[in-house]
Image (cartoon, grey):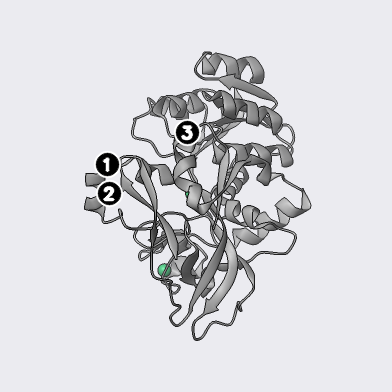
């Protein structure tokens, strides 16, 4: 089969791999949609020395997959060949308290697609039967792929921020996870202000229903958010950019009793002091993927409320063309990108 690799220094190429074979309890999924995630860019941007040292230069990236069950190993009863599935994005032991509570992302022996195990930017993906989540006929493969990372992460964050009518939410970073958060917050009845530097992403957020937009490259972000929210600030902030500046402002503009959900990883250190949190009695939270059973709540909400998550997709490209689209994604010039083998 074909698979994408990131050898380092922003190189990307398609290589040939052996087709995976399912062992006991395992499933091989023929990938129909594999979404590119902002977190894939950490591997793409790493130097070739870093990629070699981490052993990841020959590992296929991709952790947002959906597809059709292609082959099953012994002892697999929950899916059969031909079933449509979305694939949960950490493999895990299945038996520890975290796994049995559905929190596969916290299993001590979790293995992420793209490192250390092969991911979904390929023709086939090897996974565990328990990771295969049924994808109904009225949900597209692209939607299934979006659910598996950014869709789930943003949904959990908006639940934590208690998005609902009467609340005003600031979304920092309008990449795919920020845009998904914007759509959920609007569908839950909240008003949303979106903040980014990319003209393309600001325009897309406007099309998707942002109530207000701030160009972080041209405006004082805190002042612009307060002009919209009133001087007391927003009810909640969703920080997806991972930049220290945005993390700092997200806390600054959140009003008394409000909450901030952080999901963006970055290298800088925000200037946030305990006094910023104490007086306003803020709740600062992280959000990381989603417990596996939340898939069903999210699927039900998106189908019932017709949340147009697929509208965050700007490019659907054949797997073979992945190396050509990555530079634009890396520069923040695209929305969600879907690879189709
Ligand atoms: Zn992701
Ligand atoms: Zn476990």
Above-or-below relation of 88 to 323 = below
Percent x, y for residue 38? Answer: 47, 42
Determine if residue 24 is in view.
yes
Residue hosting label 3: 241
Above-or-below relation of 47 to 33 = above
Residue 267 shown left or right of residue 92 in the figure: left
Above-or-below relation of 18 to 232 = below
Percent x, y for residue 67? Answer: 59, 64
Q: Which residue is at the far bottom? A: 74
Q: Quadrant of residue 269?
A: top left
State which tag comes first along the sequence, 3 or 2: 2
Nearest the viewer among 91 and 168 is 91
Q: Residues within 10 Å of mark 1 (few under 14, many from 20)?
A: some
Q: How crowded is mark 2: few (under 14 residues within 10 Å), some or many (20 or more)?
A: many
Residue hosting label 2: 51
Residue at 64% in and 53% down: 143
Label 3: which secondary element: loop
Residue hosting label 1: 47
Percent x, y for residue 220? Answer: 51, 13
| Tag shown at residue 35 | none
Residue 206 shown left or right of residue 249 in the figure: right
């Amino acid at each position: 089969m074909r698979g994408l690799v990131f050898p380092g220094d922003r190189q990307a190429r398609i290589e040939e791999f052996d087709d995976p074979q399912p062992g006991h309890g395992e499933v091989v999924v023929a990938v129909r949609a594999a979404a590119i995630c902002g977190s894939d860019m950490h591997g793409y941007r790493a130097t070739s020395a870093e990629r070699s040292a981490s052993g990841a230069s020959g590992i296929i990236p991709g952790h947002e997959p959906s597809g059709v069950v292609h082959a099953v190993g012994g002892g697999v009863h929950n899916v059969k060949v031909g079933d449509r599935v979305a694939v949960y994005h950490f493999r895990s032991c299945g038996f520890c308290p975290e796994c049995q509570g559905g929190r596969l992302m916290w299993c001590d022996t979790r293995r992420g697609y793209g490192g250390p195990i092969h991911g979904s930017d390929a023709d086939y993906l090897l996974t565990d039967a328990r990771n295969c989540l049924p994808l109904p006929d009225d949900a597209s493969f692209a939607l299934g792929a979006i659910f598996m990372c950014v869709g789930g992460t943003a949904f959990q964050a908006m639940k934590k921020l208690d998005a609902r009518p009467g609340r005003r939410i600031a979304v920092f970073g309008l990449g795919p996870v920020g845009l998904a958060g914007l759509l959920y917050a609007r569908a839950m009845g909240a008003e949303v202000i979106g903040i980014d530097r990319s003209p393309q992403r600001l325009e897309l957020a406007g099309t998707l229903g942002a109530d207000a937009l701030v160009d972080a490259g041209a405006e004082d972000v805190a002042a612009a958010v307060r002009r919209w929210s009133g001087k007391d600030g927003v009810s909640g902030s969703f920080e997806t950019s991972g930049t220290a500046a945005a993390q700092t402002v997200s806390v600054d503009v959140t009003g008394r009793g409000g909450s901030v959900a952080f999901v963006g990883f970055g290298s800088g250190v925000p200037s946030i002091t305990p006094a910023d949190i104490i007086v306003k009695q803020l709740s600062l939270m992280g959000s990381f993927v989603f417990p596996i059973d939340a898939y069903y709540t999210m699927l039900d909400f998106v189908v019932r409320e017709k949340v147009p998550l697929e509208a965050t997709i700007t490019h659907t490209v054949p797997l073979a063309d992945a190396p050509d689209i990555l530079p634009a994604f890396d520069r923040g010039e695209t929305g969600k990108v879907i690879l189709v083998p």
